[in-house]
Amino acid sequence: MTAPPAATAPATWYHATVPAAPARPALSGTVRTRVCVVGGGLCGVSAALHLAERGIDTVLLESETIGHGASGRNGGQIVQGFSASMDRVAAAVGRADAQAFWDMGREAIADIPDRVERHGIDCDLRWGYLIAALNRRQLGELHETVAEWAGYGYTGPSIVEGAAVRSVLGTDLYVGGMLEPGSGQLHPLAYLRGLAGAAEAAGARLFEQSPATAIEHGTTVRIGTPGGTVVADTLVLAGNAYLGRLVPSIRRRLMPVASFVGVTEPLGEERARRLFPQDVAVADCNVALDYFRLTADRRLLFGAGASYSATTPVGLKGWLARRFRRVFPELTDVAVEYAWGGLIGITHNRIPDLGRLKPNVLYAQGFSGQGMALTGLAGKLMAETVAGDDSRFRLVERVRHLPFPGGILRTPTLVAAMGLLKLKDRLGW
Ligand SMILES: Cc1cc2nc3c(=O)[nH]c(=O)nc-3n(C[C@H](O)[C@H](O)[C@H](O)COP(=O)(O)OP(=O)(O)OC[C@H]3O[C@@H](n4cnc5c(N)ncnc54)[C@H](O)[C@@H]3O)c2cc1C
């Protein structure tokens, strides 16, 4: 194997605060394996881990370094359910199977503490979440969500309104919110690196700086990289929004949307406790939502987006500071130390897109901003399928995913659609 070229890690607070990762080789020569996974994010790494644990020979190719994509840049929020409402899931698969979907979502969350404990991953896992309403319409929708989830047997969340919000969060911006004890937060890159180490310990071979650039289908699949070739019985595609144009047929069903994250200098213990009395992670209800939380070293980690145009706001740190000062006006003296952007893979209906391109080519993409837990489930379902039991994968595969508009109209059409939704949020309709 050749030595990897110098790693190109994104300049995130996450990359600055995890211990150095072990050097991994770039692929060279021809390697034969049962399964080749393309993509070293949470989905691909979790697929590799589940496969290796089942004794299935697995090679993973990552074009940069593990966690280069959304998994090493995200808000670190673990969120219950799906980005789509359960009504929409039920419309797609029927009410009985929607229950199976819901239960799998719960399993996806439960798997996180299980993995953290089993592999001794130090990733600052904490529980407690507030979905915050900016107006009465949004608060009404949160009441409906509480009732909807109760219909699926989950009665964890409760509504806080008016002055009671202050006991959860030090701001007067929100009219209320849904307090959700079963959702939470962690350091996503530390978690992912822990999973990657566990996958290697179980026997998976991980290659970095090894982009898959060509795929040749057949009874075995040949995956070419600049330095070598993997010959596999089965290919698992887990490149999501970072897969680019490698597989045009699945790209049409995915819209990469930009979102941006900033991390401030430390707030200090007293101020952190005052602004986050219950230390919850928070997201508001807007389409282009704000999401934020405290880091372990008591900085404010604040994310905002999303934009279909994928252009970075001019003066990103200042742009993020203006956004978080709307929530916490007192933070005028606090500077943003880290700022970065990333791509979220969104589907039309906001339900993850799992499927088969060929009998021996599986893919998973489009977690629509809620991939922290659902990627783990997708990896698990793909491993089950390779091992011979595709019953749960078939359930998810049944969901129909519409393509986004193509050609030169793709971006302008979506920017206009997003603009209308943002206006609706601003006016409180
Ligand atoms: C800014 C931001 C904030 C977010 N916040 C949250 C949040 O708080 N909570 C939440 O649940 N979700 C959040 N998400 C979404 C979540 O991060 C994703 O759903 C999840 O990380 C997707 O994981 P993945 O493994 O499918 O894709 P990725 O993590 O994007 O991994 C794909 C990997 O594939 C690699 N790759 C692509 N093409 C190739 C190729 N040809 N060959 C080899 N490798 C390739 C890429 O380099 C990349 O590392 C956020 C996303 C972003 C961008």
Image (tube, rainbow, N blue to C red):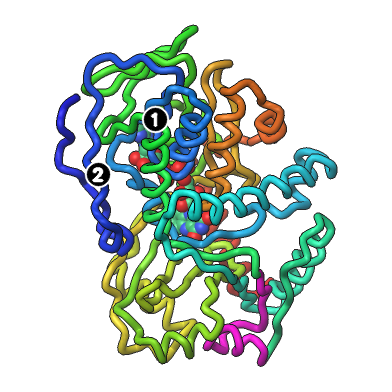
Front residue of 160 and 202: 202
- Tell me residue 83's x, y (percent): 62, 53
The quarter in which the C terminus is drawn is: bottom right
Q: Which mark is residue 286?
A: none
Front residue of 281 and 340: 281
Q: Is residue 122 above or below residue 334?
A: above
- Tell me residue 178's x, y (percent): 68, 73
Which residue is rendered at x = 78% and y = 52% of the image?
A: 87
- Tell me residue 103's x, y (percent): 73, 48
Residue 408 shows up from this direction = no
Front residue of 203 and 62: 203
Magenta stretch encompasses residue 4: no
Give the image quarter of residue 382.
Answer: top right
- Please provide the residue range marked out in magenta: 163-180
Instruction: Tell me: is circle 2 under 8 Å from ligand 1.
Output: no
Badge 2 element:
loop
Q: Which mark is residue 203?
A: 1
- Crowding at dot 1, Cα within 10 Å, few <14 / some 14-19 / many 20+, comes out as some
Instruction: Tell me: is circle 1 under 8 Å from ligand 1.
Output: no
Which residue is rendered at x = 46% and y = 62% of the image?
A: 186
Total numbered labels placed on residues in the image: 2
Q: Which mark is residue 22?
A: 2
Q: Are marks 1 and 2 in contact (CB under 8 Å)?
A: no
The type of residue carrying mark 1 is Gly
The type of residue carrying mark 2 is Pro
Between disc 1 and disc 2, whose residue precedes? 2
- Tell me residue 68's x, y (percent): 33, 46
Gap in Å between the C-alphas at discs 1 and 2? Answer: 15 Å
Which residue is rendered at x = 48% and y = 90% of the image?
A: 274
The quarter in which the N terminus is drawn is: top left
Left or right placement of residue 312 versus residue 418 in this view: left
